[in-house]
Amino acid sequence: MNAEILIRYGHFLGILAIASSLVAEHLLIKPSLTRKEISRLATLDGIYGAGALLVLGCGLGMWLGGFKNADYYTQNPIFHTKVTLFVIMGILSIWPTVFFLKQRKGNAEEVVAVPKRIVMFLRMELLIVFIMPLLATLVARGVGLG
Ligand code: HEM
């Protein structure tokens, strides 16, 4: 197996980790949660973070690794849109992550209210994840290049 195949595989594994952890977080989150439940969400959020790093690392590898000319991506506005959405996703994920990490500590049975914006940010991240493969496919096919 050559480096390109491994990197592409890593990109897909990262995407699977991101999508599955976000769906699981979305299914488990409720208006109020015990600290024990929040701790489980924090674990899922860790999987999400590891997936995001894998996606980013492998994405950068494909972009700059010389498999296609880097200009092929750099000159495509759809690729810029994809990377920008990924950055927005990263920014949106800060609030849930900070909330889970702070609120998991303490009495495991204590109930904590979950701010509505945490659920809203998770939903926005999910929406972005489902748009990304379309943008990625367009870029891979050269759509968007002058
Ligand atoms: C959640 C975030 C992301 C998703 C869901 C995603 C999805 C995908 C998918 C499905 C492909 C395969 C396209 C195909 O072969 O038809 C792909 C390829 C690629 N992705 Fe991503 N990606 C994400 C983030 C990123 C980021 C952050 C970068 C750059 C830093 C990146 C760079 C690339 C590159 C360079 C390719 C190769 C395209 C080609 O074959 O020419 N991706 N991505």
Image (spheres, helix red, strand yellow):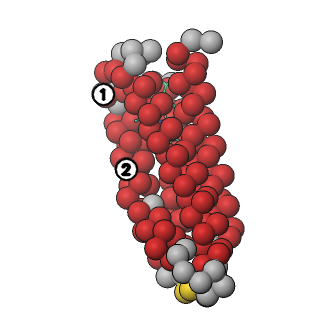
Q: Is residue 13 above or below residue 5?
A: below
The quadrant of the rendering that contains the N terminus is top right
Report helix, strand or loop for mark 2. helix
Q: Nearer the viewer, residue 82 or 20?
A: 20
Horizontal side of residue 39 vs 138, given as left or right: right
Q: Which residue is mark 2?
A: 87
**Residue 117 visible somewhere in the drawing:** yes
Residue 118 in picture, x, y percent from top left? 50, 73
- Whether pointer 2 and pointer 1 mark residues with C-beta atoms closer than 8 Å, the reply is no
Q: Select label 2 or label 1 by which is in front.
A: 2
Question: From where the camera sits, is residue 118 visible?
Answer: no
Compared with 107, 132 (above or below) is above
Q: CA distance from mark 2 to mark 1?
A: 18 Å
Ligand 1 within 8 Å of the CB at mark 2 = no
**Residue placed at 65% from the left, 74% from the top?**
37
Q: Position of residue 94 (x, y in %)?
A: 41, 63
Q: How many marks?
A: 2
User: Which badge, 2 or 1, comes first in the chain's sequence?
Assistant: 1
Residue indicated by mark 1: 75
Q: Residue at x 42, y 47 (%)?
A: 86
**Farthest top residue in view:** 2
Residue 3 badge: none
Image location of residue 85, percent across then percent down: 41, 49
Q: Amino acid at mark 1?
A: Gln
Q: Residue at x 40, y 30 (%)?
A: 60
